[in-house]
Amino acid sequence: MDLSKRQQRIIEIVKADGPITGEQIADQLTLTRATLRPDLAILTMAGFLDARPRVGYFYTGKTGSELLTEKIKRYKVYEFQQVPVAVSEKVSVYDAISTMFLEDVGTLFVVDENSCLVGVLSRKDLLRASMGRQDLSSIPVPIIMTRMPNITVCHKNDLLIDVAHQLISRQIDGVPVVKDTENGLEVIGRITKTTMTKLLVELTIEDTI
Ligand code: ADP
């Protein structure tokens, strides 16, 4: 975040003289405590300063980018997961291609009659199947999908950054968010490369750090 001149001055004062009360900071800037209140609130919320009752403000020693990194590392999957798009294991490759277009997604999750995860279909899986001369409506999706147990999954309380690492290291576009049930893994969401791109854009707009 961009700090105003006054906010930068406050940080310098607290760095040099902290712990220091709001009153004392105001004195040094020849301003009133009330005038400073919004700046101190912003600096504390953003994590540059910490405030302790009866002690005053002190500098946390962290740079803006350190604070941003800490913030990103705390994000959980459930805060960002999107709605998953699933098809039954009974559908044909033709139907899966139609669903991919209609739902406008790049990854389809394949589920059994209990809505539990059995496979994943990517764009290229479907393209590859379309290159032959077969009738696509007569090929069931299990023939071409990537199957359990070779599917990378995540849970809603996992750290988002760990899923981002998996997207990169396994070279995949999406990971299903699953819930453990007695019948298997129920698909409750998805994290994709688009989720991560959206987050990047939001961070630049949000500007709370
Ligand atoms: P594309 O194949 O369109 O580039 P991906 O990179 O997502 O899309 O998929 C690459 C391969 O990895 C495909 O064969 C796909 O079935 C498989 N795959 C996709 N997502 C997962 C996942 N979460 N776990 C395991 N394999 C996956």
Image (cartoon, rainbow, N blue to C red):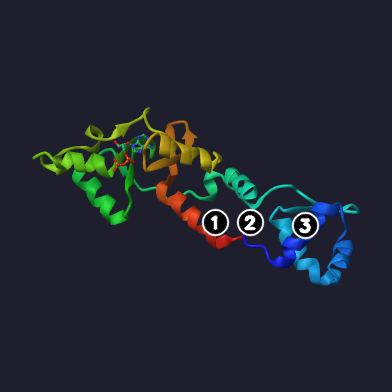
- The answer to whether one can see residue 133 in this image is yes
Judged from this view, the residue extending furthest toward the right is 54
Q: Please state if 172 lies on the left or on the right of 196 as rendered.
A: left
Question: In which quadrant will I find the N terminus?
Answer: bottom right
Q: Where is residue 100 in the image (x, y as percent from the top left)?
A: 28, 50
Q: Mark 2 points at which residue?
A: 209
Give the label on residue 143, or none: none
Q: Please state if 17 lies on the left or on the right of 93 as rendered.
A: right
Q: Nearer the viewer, residue 107 or 66?
A: 66
Residues under numbered marks 2 and 3 in contact, where contact means CB atoms less than 8 Å apart: no
Q: Where is residue 121 in the image (x, y as percent from the top left)?
A: 29, 40
Dot 3 surroundings within 10 Å: few (below 14), some, or many (20 or more)? few
Q: Which amino acid type is marked by label 1?
A: Leu
Q: Mark 1 points at which residue?
A: 203
Q: Which residue is drawn at 31% across and 54% down?
A: 103
Q: What element carries label 2?
A: loop
Gap in angstroms between the C-alphas marked 1 and 3: 26 Å
Question: In which quadrant will I find the C terminus?
Answer: bottom right
